[in-house]
Amino acid sequence: MTQPSDARDAPSRRTAAGVLALACAAQFMVVLDVSVVNVALPSIQAELRLNAAWLPWAAGAYALAFGGFLLLGARLADLYGHRKVFTAGLALFTAASLAGGLAGSGSLLIAARAVQGLGAAVLAPITLTVLTTTFPEGPARVRALAIWTAVSLTGGAAGNLLGGALTQALSWRSILLINVPIGIVAAPAAARLLTATATAGRGRQRLDVPGALLATAGLTGLTFGISESRHGPGDPAALTALVVALACLAAFVLVEARYASAPLMPPRLLAARPIAIGNTVMLLAGACFQIPMWYFLTLYLQNVLRYSALQTGAAFLPHTLLTLTVGLQVTPRLMRRVDSRTLITAGALIAAAGFWWQSRITPDSTYLTGVLGPAILISVGGGLFNTPLTTTVTSGVPTADAGAASGLMNTAKQLGGVLGLAALTTLAPGTSTQPHTLTTGYGHAFLACAALLTAVAALARTLPVAHPTPSPPAPPPPRAPHQQDPQQAT
C-alpha cells in the first residue's frame, strides 16, 4: 500500500527541523562569543593587568581570526562535506574555549581567543550552508533564514546579558568555559543530523591555503595599521602595517583569479551584482553592529554610569527582545509585500537615526534617554534589514559554491566589525578616566556609525530589486470520494 505523502515526507521534515535547530544553536554560540567578552572587559583588565591599548584585542582577536579564515572554513565545507568539517570546527572551538577560560595572562587569553575564532571560522559558514542546501528557494528558505538571522542578531545582545550574569555570579572565566559542555553535547547531534545533508567532498581539488594565509595576513595588517593610526597619521608602525596589508591583499586577488584550483572567493561570485554590492553593504553595516556598538556601549555603562556587569548585561535586554521580535515576526511578513531593497534601505536609515540619538549621550544621561530610546531604533532597524540582506547575498548561488557564498557573507560581516572597532577606537580616548572626556569619545564613535549607516542606505539603493517572496499556495480542497476529476470527465 502506498503511504500518504505526509507520511513519506515526515522523516525529511524532521531532519530539516533538526538541521535548522543545530545550525541555529551553533550560530548562536559562535555569535555569542563575539560579544560575551565585552561586559567582562573591565574584570579581565583588572585580573590580567591588560593595558588599554591591548584591551580591544581581547574582543577583537576572536573576530579577526574569525573573519580572516572564514573563506577557508567555508571552502572546507564545499570540498570535504558538512558533517566532517562541522565536527572539526566544533572541536577546535570547544578546546580553545577551555584554554581561554584557564588562561593565566593577557597574552594567553588573546591567543586562545584567536584560536577560538579560527574554530568559529570553520564552524559558522556551515550553519548557513546547510540551510541553503536543505531548504529550496522560496517561503521555506525565507523562514529558515529569518530564524537563523534573528538568532545571529540576538546572539550579540544575549552575549552581553549572559556575560554580565556569569561574570558577576562566578567569574569572567565562566563565559568561555560554558562552551565546553555545549560543544560536547552538540558533537553527537551533528554526527546524526548532518549525515543526510552532507555533500560529497571534492578532496581531489587543491585547498587554497596560500589564499587563506594571504587574506588573513592582509586583513590582520589592515586592522593593526588602522588601530595604530591613533598615534598619528605618520606613525611608522601603522604605515608599515598598512603597506604590508595592501601588498598581501593584492597578492590574494591575484592568487584567487589565476592560480587557485578551488579559490576561497571564486571571481564568478563577485561578478553577480547582488553578491558584490550586498556583501559591501554587509561589511559597512558590520562596522557598526557586529562589535563596535556593544564595545562602546558597554564601556559607557560601566565606566561612566557605573553599572555592574550584571546591570550592564540586563541593560541590553531590550536590544535582544526587539531584534528577535522584528527579525522573526515582522520582517518575514513584510518580505511578502515589500521588495528587499526597500527593506534594507529603510532598516539602515532607522538604525542610523538610533545611532545619532545614541551619540547625544552625556555623563548625566539616564538609561531611558541615553540607552533605551536609541536601542529601540537601532534594534528595529537591524532586525528589519538583516534578513532581506542575507537572502539577497545567498540567492541564486549554485550548490557547488554555497559554502563560498556563505563564507563571503560571514567574512564581510565579521571583518566589518573588526575594522570598524579598529577605526572607531581612534575616536575614543583609551587612557582617560574623566566621564566627560570618555562620553565625548563614545559619542563620536556612535555618530560615525550613524554616518556610515546613512551611506549604507544610499548604497543599498543600487541593489537590484528582489521581488517580494510570495506566500506558499494553499492546497486544493479535498474532493469527496464520489466526485469525479473534471479532467477525467472530459
Image (cartoon, helix red, strand yellow):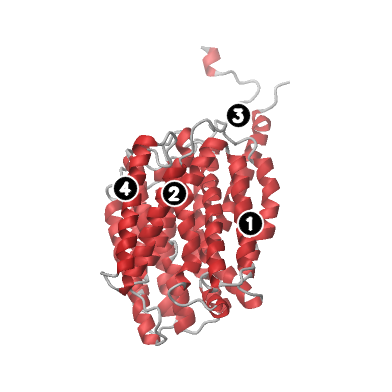
Along the horizontal axis of the image, is 87 left or right of 435?
right
Q: Which residue is mark 2?
A: 213
Dot 2 or dot 4: first in sequence order is 2
State the SS at label 4: helix
Amino acid type at image mark 3? Pro
> In the image, which is nearer the foreground, mark 3 or mark 1?
1
Specify the amino acid type for callout 1.
Answer: Thr
Earlier in the chain: of badge 2 and badge 1, it is: 1
Is residue 288 visible in the rendered image? The answer is yes
* Mark number, residue 478: 3
Q: Quadrant of the N terminus?
A: top right
Please report the residue visible at 34 percent of the width from the left and 46 percent of the height from the top: 251
Position of residue 167 relative to residue 345, above or below, is below
Task: For label 4, count other residues whose C-alpha is less than 10 Å away and answer few (under 14), some (14-19) or many (20+).
Answer: some
Q: Marks 2 and 1, Cα distance to the nearest angstrom?
A: 23 Å
Q: What secondary structure is marked by label 1?
A: helix
Gap between marks 3 and 2, in whole Å? 60 Å
Determine the secondary structure under disc 3: loop
Please state which of the two labelled residues, at mark 3 or mark 2, is closer to the viewer.
2
Looking at the image, which residue sits at the far top? 490
